Image (cartoon, rainbow, N blue to C red):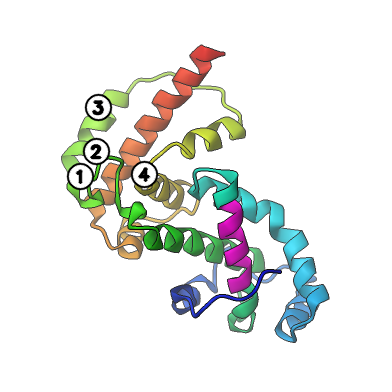
Amino acid sequence: MPPGLATDPIEHRLPSVQHVEGGLEPGFEPIIDGCIAGEHRSQQRVYELFYGKMLAVCLRYTKNTDQAKDILQDGFIKVFRSMDRFNRSGSFEGWIRRIMVNTAIDHFRRTKNAYLLLGEERSIEDFGDQDEEDVLEDSSGEEEMDLKPADVINAMQKLTPAYRTVFNLYVFEEMTHKEIADMLGINVGTSKSNLAKAKNNLKKMLRKERKLL
């Protein structure tokens, strides 16, 4: 595993992920104990068990595989550093997943405010509820598309960081717009607007890809 990182703000958000997705899965107690004791074999086991699943999560928040792997690496460092904070009342996989999501969001916050930009130097706060209504009106009545997961992920990676993040948090993490707004420091109307625009842009890209086939 790579060397450790400096103190990270994600650790202050860990209490919010303790009770997600049911109880602790069977068989993880000894692995967690081993990680807390600093056993390399236990850490390697966690890495092997969750590498594929968590890489898929990171890919949805990033623009390419290299960026996703960087975030995944940072995420695992945070998992091992914070293992003693997991109180075992919730899903271990769900806890790791939330750390990966928070790591991805923190990455964009640190990268020259790229997370807050929407392509043309427009702040995420520039959009309001009217934008959402316009997009929903434009996208109504469109046909259903038979899509492969890889097609959707490829299209998602072409979205701006702001659109992509809100879309992921709402659709895959099942957060409410209020929760998203609180987490990202935006208002509810902005969250709704960016979700609607993300969906609309995804539909346009996916339709274009289908026509090229």
Characterize the local packing of mark 2: few (<14), some (14-19) or many (20 or more) Cα atoms within 10 angstroms: many
User: Mark 3 falls on what kind of element?
Assistant: helix
**Mark closer to the chain start, 2 or 4:** 2
* Occupied quadrant, residue 82: bottom right
CB under 8 Å between discs 3 and 4: no
> Residue 163 — which label?
4
- Amino acid under disc 2: Glu
* Occupied quadrant, residue 50: bottom right
**Mark closer to the chain start, 2 or 3:** 2
The kind of secondary structure the magenta stretch mainly shows is: helix
- Amino acid under disc 3: Glu
Q: How many marks?
A: 4
CB under 8 Å between discs 2 and 1: yes
- Amino acid under disc 4: Tyr
Q: Is 73 within the magenta?
A: yes
Image quadrant occupied by the N terminus: bottom right
- Residue 128 shown left or right of residue 205 in the figure: left
- Which residue, given by chain and number where applicable, does mark 1 sit on? 127
- Which residue, given by chain and number where applicable, does mark 2 sit on? 132
Q: Is 141 within the magenta?
A: no
- Which residue, given by chain and number where applicable, does mark 3 sit on? 137
The stretch of residues the image draws in magenta is 68-78
